[in-house]
């Protein structure tokens, strides 16, 4: 098995979550107002997003002693965020393209991220599980 292949999933996953979480922190009250959410709840979402992204990277580092646990926790931080995004903002439209009726777009991208998060939860760091 190629020991570097997992980075092709981890890096885009991490970048997506870190970018979105940090973006929420940059304008927390404005983002909360736009999404119709309390600031406190959006802050928790932003924290979960950043931690999921950082955890995806740290969990992939071969020398990190608890990489399996960190990978699972990264998935556990991301999964509820993606479920919330799908059911609060993107459902029932599947297509990612934003329209007048669905200005936030559909949920195909969020479903893919949810799938990766669930994979992280269920498999952890496969490489460490094989040892």
Image (cartoon, rainbow, N blue to C red):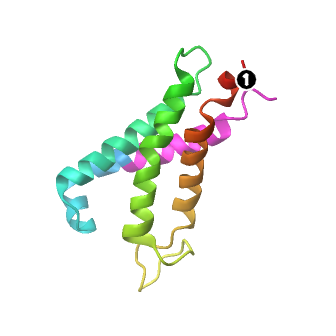
Q: Quadrant of the N terminus?
A: top right
Where is 116 relative to 38, above or below? above
Write down the quadrant of residue 129 in the picture: top right
**Residue that appears at 49% across and 48% down:** 16
> Residue 64: where, in percent of width, then height?
54, 16
Q: Secondary structure at mark 1?
A: helix
**Residue that appears at 79% across and 29% down:** 2
Where is 43 relative to 129, above or below? below
> Residue 23: where, in percent of width, then height?
33, 50
Q: Which residues are magenta?
A: 1-20
> Residue 21 colored magenta?
no
**Residue that appears at 40% across and 77% down:** 103
Q: How many marks?
A: 1
Q: Is residue 116 visible?
A: yes
Q: Is residue 27 visible?
A: no
The dominant secondary structure in magenta is: helix
> Residue 12 colored magenta?
yes
**Residue that appears at 45% across and 65% down:** 86
Q: Quadrant of the C terminus?
A: top right
Point out the residue furthest to the bottom here.
101
Point out the residue furthest to the right here.
1
Q: Which residue is mark 1?
A: 130
Where is 105 relative to 21, above or below? below
7 left or right, relative to 78: right
Label 1 crowd bin: few (<14), some (14–19), many (20+), radius 10 Å = few
> Residue 125: where, in percent of width, then height?
62, 29
> Residue 18: where, in percent of width, then height?
42, 42
């Amino acid at each position: 098995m190629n020991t570097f292949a997992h980075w092709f999933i981890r890096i885009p996953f991490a970048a997506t979550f870190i970018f979105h979480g940090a973006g929420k922190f940059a304008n927390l009250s404005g983002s909360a107002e736009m999404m119709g959410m309390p600031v406190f709840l959006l802050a928790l979402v932003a924290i979960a997003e950043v931690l999921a992204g950082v955890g995806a990277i740290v969990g992939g580092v071969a020398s990190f002693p608890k990489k399996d646990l960190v990978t699972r926790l990264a998935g556990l931080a991301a999964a509820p965020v993606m479920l919330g995004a799908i059911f609060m903002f993107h459902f029932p439209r599947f297509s990612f393209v934003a329209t007048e009726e669905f200005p936030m777009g559909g949920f195909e991208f969020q479903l893919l991220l949810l799938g990766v998060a669930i994979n992280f939860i269920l498999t952890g760091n496969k490489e460490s599980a094989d040892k």
